[in-house]
Structure formats: structure tokens, C-alpha cells
Amino acid sequence: ALVAHVPTIMLPEETRLQINDGNEITLVPGLRRMRTECFERLEPDTVIVFDTHWESTFEHIVTAQDRRQGRFTSHELPRGMRQIPYDMPGDPELAKRIAAQAEGRDDCWILASDDPYLPIFYGTVNIWTFLGNPDTRWLSVALNQCCDTDDFLLLGSLIGQAIAESDRR
């Protein structure tokens, strides 16, 4: 799915209604519908988020921690997105499998990072808040700002191969 993560979805409901003339922001019911119609029906064991707020410069980066937890405050919008709790299981096995797809290649570099201080961004936190559940693992992928379309297509292909070689849904 291609999903927006606009910061206003994280505001309290009464505030969202107030700033939108009494109407809910359309993304909120859309995410709720996605959860019930897709996530709850398909029961994915792992979700991979291509987080548009996490850009890298040299290589693609995939989170590889067993768990990411804490509180998130946006560096862009700390007034509206502050101290949002998150506690999401990771999938280090799949992250390492993804990185292994690029080993020995000179056209793609992927790092599976399990660094506990690796930051998290609201492109992941906002979507997880609406779609996450305790049994679903989450990976985030940094978008390499030095890539072009073919590089992104290659990354997608390598991720697809890693998934196909795994037991993940």
C-alpha cells in the first residue's frame, strides 16, 4: 500500500475535528479500514515500511533490532507529535536476509542495522500507531537519496527475493 503519514493524524480526535470543520481527516478512517479489511484479514507476520522521512546517503538501511520501543517526538513538528509511545517487534532474521541479497554486488548496498540508537521517524511511527498489533513485526527501510528509479526497482526486487526465500507473509 502507498499510505500517507501526515502529522495531523496523530493529534487528539477533538483537535482533528476542530481544525477540519467538524470532520475527521480522511486518512484516519482510511487507515482504520485498512486495518480491518486488510491487516486483520491477511494477518501479515512482518510489515516493511519504506519510510520517506528516513533518508540515507550511501546505502539502503533496514532496521534489524529485535524490538524498537520508546517515545517519539518529531523534530519537524514537536508541538503536535510529542512523546508518542511505540513498542514494535522487529524482524532481524528477515532484515539480515534482505541485506544478504546485496552481498557481492557492486550495484546495490544494503545494511541491516541493529544499532539500538538508530532513530525512528514518523513515517513509521504514525502508520504503526494505526496498523500495528503486538504479533506483527515491523521493519523500516531508509530511502537512499542518491538513488534513481532503477536503484529503487533493484532494491524492491532484492527485498522480494528475500521474502520469497523466507517463510514470511
Image (cartoon, helix red, strand yellow):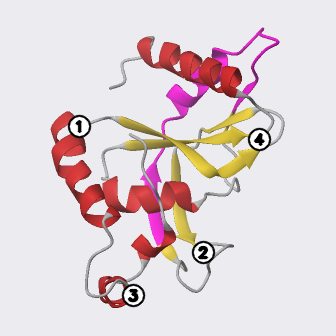
Q: Nearer the viewer, mark 1 or mark 3?
A: 3
Q: Residue at x 30, y 85 (%)?
A: 17
Alpha carbons under labels 1 and 3: distance apart = 34 Å
Residue 122, percent from left and from top: 55, 62
The N terminus: image quadrant: top left
Who's the residue at 76% across and 23% down the image?
109
**Mark 1 — residue?**
43
Q: Are marks 1 and 3 in contact (CB under 8 Å)?
A: no
Q: Earlier in the sequence, mark 2 or mark 4?
A: 2
> Which marked residue is nearer to the observer: mark 3 or mark 2?
3
- The quadrant in which the C terminus is found is top left
Secondary element type, mark 1: loop
Q: Dot 1: few (<14), some (14–19), or many (≥20) neighbours within 10 Å? A: few
- Residue annotated with mark 2: 73
Q: In the rendered structure, which disc, 1 or 4, sits on the residue that comes first in sequence? A: 1
Q: For mark 4, does the 10 Å Cα neighbourhood hold few (<14), some (14 to 19), or many (20 or more) residues?
A: some
Looking at the image, is mark 1 or mark 3 earlier in the sequence?
3
- Mark 1 or mark 4, whichever is nearer to me: 4
Question: Which residue is under mark 3?
Answer: 19
